[in-house]
Structures are given as C-alpha cells and as structure tokens.
C-alpha cells in the first residue's frame, strides 16, 4: 500500500485528499493509560505518520503532542489510528486547533516549494 502511493507520487499522480511532507521529530501518543513516543515520518493537514510497530489499534483515538523543529510550538491534537504496516502507522486528526492546522498547512506548502526548486 505504501509503495503504491509512493509510485503514484513519483509519476506526478496524487490521490491523497491532502498533500503531505516528510517531518522529523517525535509524536507523544497518549491513550488508555499508556504513553508511547514514536519518531515522526510525515504530516499533512489530515493527519501524520509515525514509526511504530505496536501499542495502538485501528480505530483507537489518542491525544497527541507533535514535537518538531519545523514548528515553533508543540502541536496538540486528537487523532485516530487509521492503518498500520511495515512499522509505520497512520493517524487521522479528529480534533486540531486552527493555529496548529495553519502551521501544518504552511509547513507542507513550504516543503513542496523546496522539493520543486530542487527538482528543477
């Protein structure tokens, strides 16, 4: 599944609802009395991906903190675990502040511009 999206992106076809960008940092996932910390992989207006093998199940809603040098502040949100495989899980935002959403959109747009300039 992940390779399919990557191949489509490489040939210029993007079937995603929101564009995404690679992101460094960590996500702190809290739910059901447990706290997990996982490296961030990517982010979009709709959600984010982290490197994580276990500890979260599909449909589980978690409180999340996103820590990244890309953002001036820690981003707080609620997100639902949507899919997982090959050591990566995808989280969909269910509740995110307008400020955090704006910061994410700005970061993704800037990342796309940098990629376009490098490719030219």
Image (cartoon, rainbow, N blue to C red):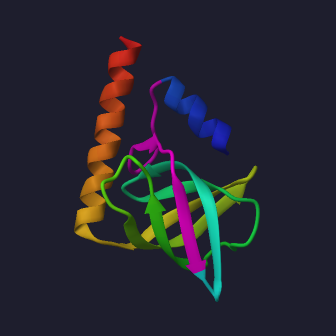
Quadrant assignment for the N terminus: top right
Percent across and percent down for residue 92 are 49, 65
Percent across and percent down for residue 110 are 29, 36
What residue lies at 64% left-to-right and 88% top-to-bottom? 33
Q: Nearer the viewer, residue 3 or 115?
A: 115
Q: Nearer the viewer, residue 35 or 95?
A: 35
What residue lies at 54% left-to-right and 57% top-to-bottom? 26
Q: Is residue 119 left or right of residue 25?
A: left
Q: Residue furthest bottom?
A: 33
Q: Is residue 8 above or below residue 89?
A: above
- Could you tell me how many numbered marks the image carries? 0
Quadrant assignment for the C terminus: top left
Percent across and percent down for residue 114 are 34, 26
Is residue 64 in the magenta section? no
Is residue 15 in the magenta section? yes
Percent across and percent down for residue 47 are 46, 59
Q: Residue 66's image quarter?
A: bottom left
What residue lies at 62% left-to-right and 65% top-to-bottom? 37
What residue lies at 74% left-to-right and 53% top-to-bottom? 87
Q: Is residue 27 left or right of residue 99?
A: right
Q: Is residue 62 above or below residue 87?
A: below
Part of the protein shown in magenta? 12-30
Q: Is residue 59 above or below residue 11?
A: below
Q: Is residue 50 left or right of residue 102?
A: right
Q: Residue 94's image quarter?
A: bottom left
């Amino acid at each position: 599944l992940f390779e399919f999206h990557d191949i489509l992106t490489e040939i210029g076809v993007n079937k995603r609802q929101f564009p995404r960008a690679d992101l460094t940092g960590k996500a702190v996932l809290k739910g059901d009395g447990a706290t997990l910390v996982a490296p961030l992989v990517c982010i979009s207006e709709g959600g984010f991906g982290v490197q994580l093998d276990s500890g979260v199940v599909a449909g589980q809603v978690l409180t999340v903190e996103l820590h990244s040098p890309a953002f001036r502040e820690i981003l707080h949100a609620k997100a639902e675990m949507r899919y997982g495989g090959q050591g990566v899980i995808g989280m969909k935002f269910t509740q995110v502040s307008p400020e955090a959403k704006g910061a994410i959109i700005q970061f993704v747009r800037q990342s796309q511009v940098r990629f376009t300039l490098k490719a030219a």
